[in-house]
Amino acid sequence: MGIKSFQGARKHQNTTTQRALKVKDYMTTNLITFKPHQKIHTVVEAIIKNKISGGPVVNDKNELVGIISEGDCLKQLSESRYYNMPLEEDLVEKRMIKNVETIDGNMDIFDAANKFLNSKRRRFPIVENGRLVGQISQKDILKAALQLKSENWNSTTKG
């Protein structure tokens, strides 16, 4: 009686997950973006209408210059009441976060999942050659994981 090695099973498992599961394959490319000179109230309208929690801010060359979230809009709303300033007058560029952390489209989705956990962010923009090309969210990573799991189930039941 010999001892069974599980190296074969591990090796098989690794070949399944080493398939190119890249961020760019799961990112959203049809994005709602905002411009720096847009008024905050138009961002609030877009957030409500599109059921989003924020979005990238781009210039006329589609270069990422910031990110604005519903939280940024809430801060503006709160301050406008406190300082008695009308909501309509404030611009995106005053409220957006300018130092935006991005993620590489070629990053493995499992590494991206760790980056999400370590940063506590909900989404990361993807930039190529200075231009915004997409965005990956925690939900996109979860969808990729579910798809991978269903593919693994299918391959184990077939074979």
Image: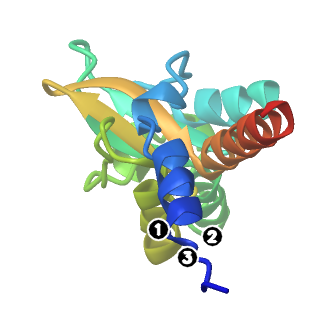
| Between discs 1 and 2, the one toward the N terminus | 2
- Depth order, front residue of 23/147: 147
Instruction: Give the distance between the C-alpha atoms of the residues marked 2 and 3, in whole angstroms.
Output: 68 Å
Tag 1–tag 2 contact (CB < 8 Å): no
- Depth order, front residue of 123/152: 152
Residue 37 seen from this side: no
Q: Please, what secondary structure does the residue beneath circle 3 have?
A: loop
The residue at 64%/50% (across/down) is 70
In the image, which disc is placed on residue 5?
3
Instruction: Give the distance between the C-alpha atoms of the residues marked 1 and 2, in whole angstroms.
Output: 39 Å
- Amino acid type at circle 2 is Tyr
Q: Please, what secondary structure does the residue beneath circle 1 have?
A: helix
The residue at 62%/78% (across/down) is 4
Residue 154 is situated, as x and y percent measured from the top left of the image, at 81, 33
Task: Report the label total.
Answer: 3
Residue 130 is situated, as x and y percent measured from the top left of the image, at 15, 27
Q: Which residue is mark 1?
A: 114
- Depth order, front residue of 107/99: 107
Task: State which quarter of the image contains the N terminus.
Answer: bottom right
Q: Which residue is mark 2?
A: 82
Instruction: Give the distance between the C-alpha atoms of the residues marked 1 and 3, in whole angstroms.
Output: 30 Å
